[in-house]
Image: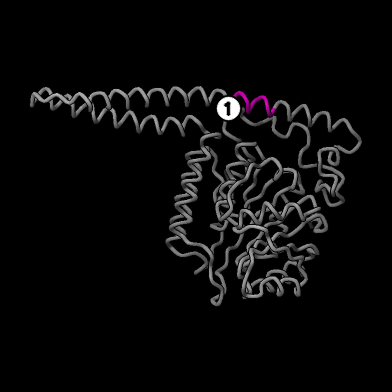
Amino acid sequence: MTPHGKVCVLVPTYNEAETIVDVVERYREEGFDDVLVVDGGSTDGTQDLASEAGARVVEQSGSGKGQAVREAMGYIDRPVVLMVDGDSTYRPDEADRMLEPIFEGRAEHVIGNRFADMRPGAMTRLNQTGNRIINRVFRYIHGTNLVDILSGYRAFTCESFEKLDLAADGFGIETEMAVECVKHSVRVDVVPITYEPRPEESETNLRPIRDGGNIIFRLYQMAKTNNPLFYFGSIGVGSGFVGVVLAGYVAYAYLFRGISHSVLALAAGVALLFGLQLVMFGVLSELIVSSNRRQTRELERIADRLDAGGTDPVGSSGLDRGAPGGADGTGGGVGDAGSHSEDDPDRPGATGQGATDGGN
């Protein structure tokens, strides 16, 4: 049994009047006495209903799920956050399953794998296809298989959240969190969960085509700092391909038609040189990023060893708000010494074993 008194249940909402009461009441019935609803200015009475059900309610200053999550951290004084959508698609009775890897010291960030038990009607065929494509793109670009990076059911420590550089305002927040976890070597575990359909009277705020396109574009953008060889190399290869095509056309026209294309020939040369330079820049950037990552991990090991020298290694590591080291909150901290010692320093953000095995 996880210590629920050290957990804040975070529920970002926007026009979830049909489901918010059920969500808040069910989590409180599971023993969570701190349910924080951050609302994006709902017009259907979501805020009043959540407050009457026993939740703390804050109206966010901006808009979008991502902005709500970032702003919510300023209202949370407990060391662990359980983030859940307000549409009643996630089961409160699986909360302990989400929190166990954190309180057992196996992970700092936990993702619920919806594909492990997806109930009929929970996700359209289009959304399933889009999710699988995005997960494969993530695995290819960022080198780690987190199984279901778009899942809204997550648990994480406040300490690990502070390491993440997040900027997304909308549904891209889950994508950013996954990329940043890999980038900063935050230990991630993936656990199987049940994903249930939304109630019929509840309407989704997700726009599959537009949001999916934005997420894929954001994945590619974030490769700039996490996998620069792929980011700059792909642009360089594209530029080189254009140069080769142009050069081939110029050569064909000159040899077989006797027509000279000086401008196209110049453009081909520029494209080839530009592509080559980008590939070289990508290689150099990758070396710099890998070196910086190794140095950062070494500094973290030194900091962990210094923290472990105190009388309360968990509290001194920044989780003295009620560190989730165990049932009594005194041992086995999330950031214990040597936690990254088995990571391959050349991999872009090696995570825990659970990140690969997921709920498969």
Q: Is residue 163 above or below residue 47?
A: above
- Give the residue at x 43% y 63%: 125
In the picture, residue 117 is in which quadrant?
bottom right
Q: Position of residue 82 (x, y in %)?
A: 71, 56
Which residue is at a point 83% across and 29% down the rendered structure image? 306
Q: Give the amino acid at mark 1.
A: Val
Picture coordinates of residue 1, whole percent (x, y):
79, 57
Tell me the quarter of the picture where residue 90 sits: bottom right
Give coordinates of residue 243: x percent, y percent: 28, 28
The magenta region covers: 290-297
Q: Dot 1, how many residues are within 10 Å of its Cα: few (below 14), some (14-19), or many (20+)?
A: many
Q: Is residue 138 magenta-colored? A: no
The image shows residue 353, relative to residue 125, as above or below, that is above
- Give the residue furthest to the front: 263
181 vs 100: above or below: above
The percent coordinates of residue 308 (x first, y second) are 84, 32
The structure residue drawn at horizontal position 54% and vertical position 23%, both measured from the top left corner, is 287
Query: Residue, x 58% and y 27% (percent of image)?
Result: 289
